[in-house]
């Protein structure tokens, strides 16, 4: 086995627990600031489409992690929706997910299973834009899990390397967009954590109390 052939297996190691940190954070804190259900819903949909593509090209080692991601990202979408009910409209999310699902289904219907790779080349851009928008337009996106996006970064790095090595354009674009999105999300989460630490530092709290009196 060539070293590059092991990259999907390494990616699987990062993909399997990928959404558990975010699910755990939500259950502990009920904090969804900076999160949108569109992100995990689109992730679940896109990974289902990747399963179709991987079967069509024979990348069997990628099937298990993709099935797990379909399930765990679906659970995450459900958790976020449950905490957003009554606070924000879900119609835009439904339209976005439904519209993208129609694009993927049309690709398969027109060109067969392997044709889904065409829209999948921009799949991560589609699923990452809502999460980036939510994170960067929320004043304090304290709901973001750095653990989850760290797993995403390492998984996408593996797919980038595999895509380049195999000359697979769909996987190369997936890896590039995934690494970029994960890096931006981690930067935003780090910035939020740093600001939160500064505001809750004992010296800062003493100054605030002094000014209040």
Image: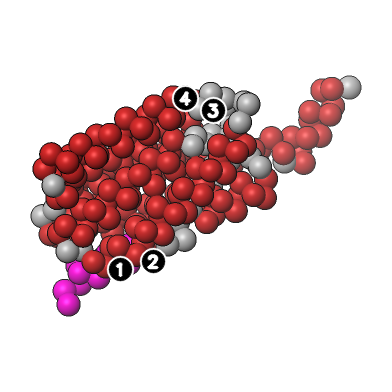
The residue drawn where x is 34% and y is 57% is 66
Q: Which of the image's four quarters has the N terminus? A: bottom left
Which residue is tagged 3?
A: 138
Q: Is residue 59 left or right of residue 128?
A: left
Q: What residue is disc 1 on?
A: 9
> Of label 4 and label 1, which has the lower sequence position?
1
Circle nearer the viewer, 4 or 2 = 4
Quadrant for residue 207, please give it. Answer: top right
User: Is the C-beta separation of discs 4 and 1 under 8 Å?
Assistant: no
What quarter of the picture does the C terminus occupy? top right
> Do the CB atoms of the residues marked 2 and 1 lie less than 8 Å apart?
yes
Q: Of callouts 4 and 3, which one flags the residue occurring earlier in the amino acid sequence?
A: 4
Alpha-carbon distance for marks 4 and 2?
Answer: 35 Å
What x and y, as percent, mark residue 155?
A: 34, 57
- Disc 2 on helix, strand or loop? helix
Tell me where residue 49 appears, x and y as whole percent.
27, 48
Mark 2 or 3 closer to N-term? 2
**Label for residue 91?**
4
Would you name the residue on which mark 2 appears? 13
Q: Main secondary structure of the magenta part?
A: helix
First in residue order: circle 4 vs circle 2:
2
Q: CA distance from mark 1 to mark 3?
A: 36 Å
In the image, residue 88 lies in the stretch drawn in magenta: no
Q: Which residues are magenta?
A: 1-12
Q: Position of residue 5 (x, y in %)?
A: 20, 69
């Amino acid at each position: 086995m060539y070293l590059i052939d092991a990259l999907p297996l390494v990616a699987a190691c990062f993909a399997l627990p990928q959404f558990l940190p975010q699910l755990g954070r939500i259950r502990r804190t009920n904090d969804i600031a900076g999160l949108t259900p569109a992100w995990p819903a689109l992730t679940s949909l896109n990974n289902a489409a990747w399963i179709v593509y991987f079967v069509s090209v024979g990348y069997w080692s990628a099937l298990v992690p993709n099935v797990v991601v379909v399930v765990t990202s679906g659970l995450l979408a459900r958790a976020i929706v449950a905490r957003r009910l009554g606070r924000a409209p879900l119609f835009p999310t439904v339209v976005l997910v439904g519209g993208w699902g129609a694009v993927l289904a049309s690709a398969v219907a027109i060109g067969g299973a392997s044709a889904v790779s065409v829209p999948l080349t921009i799949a991560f851009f589609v699923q990452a834009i809502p999460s980036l928008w939510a994170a960067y337009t929320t004043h304090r996106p304290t709901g973001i899990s750095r653990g989850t996006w760290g797993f995403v970064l390492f998984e996408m790095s593996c797919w980038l390397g595999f895509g380049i090595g195999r000359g697979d354009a769909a996987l190369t674009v997936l890896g590039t967009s995934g690494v970029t999105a994960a890096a931006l999300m981690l930067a935003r989460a780090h910035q939020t954590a740093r600001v939160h630490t500064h505001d809750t530092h004992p010296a800062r709290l003493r100054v605030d109390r002094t000014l209040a009196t």
